[in-house]
Image: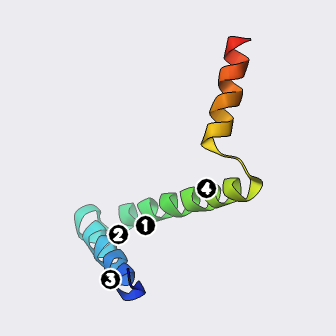
Amino acid sequence: MKLRYVGALIGLIISLGWISFGFWRMLLILLAVGIGVALGGWLDLQGITLKKTLVKLLDKLTN
């Protein structure tokens, strides 16, 4: 997908969010998404995956 389409899609989502929720709620939603992306990127850099975490959790629960 070309980057201009991605940009257009992001712009559409932001404008629809602004219309639907109002400015401050939309800003909170964008902030929450940004925090989630940053947290996911940090976990990826640390090498933590969902599969490894679930295996560790299940090992602790079964022992």
Marks 4 and 1 in Cβ contact (< 8 Å)? no
Residue type at tag 4: Gly
Q: Position of residue 17 (x, y in %)?
A: 29, 66
The image quadrant of residue 23 is bottom left
Q: Few, some or many C-alpha atoms within 10 Å of disc 3 (few <14, some 14-19, many ≥20)? A: few
Q: Secondary structure at mark 2?
A: helix
* Relative side of 20 to 39, left or right: left
Q: Secondary structure at mark 1?
A: helix
The image quadrant of residue 44 is bottom right
Kindly report the distance in space between the C-alpha atoms of the residues bearing marks 2 and 3.
19 Å
Kindly report the distance in space between the C-alpha atoms of the residues bearing marks 3 and 4.
24 Å
Q: Secondary structure at mark 3?
A: helix
Residue under label 3, please give it: 8
Residue type at tag 1: Leu
Mark 3 or 1 closer to N-term? 3
Tell me if residue 16 comes above or below residue 29 in the rendering: below
Quadrant for the N terminus, please.
bottom left
Residue under label 1, please give it: 27
Residue under label 2, please give it: 23
Q: For this rendering, which residue is in front, 28 or 63?
A: 63
Tell me if residue 33 comes above or below residue 5 in the rendering: above
Mark 3 or 4 closer to N-term? 3
Mark 2 or 3 closer to N-term? 3
Q: For this rendering, which residue is in front, 2 or 15?
A: 2
Tell me if residue 47 comes above or below residue 54 in the rendering: below
Q: For this rendering, which residue is in front, 62 or 19?
A: 62
Residue type at tag 2: Phe
Residue under label 4, please give it: 40
Kindly report the distance in space between the C-alpha atoms of the residues bearing marks 4 and 2.
26 Å
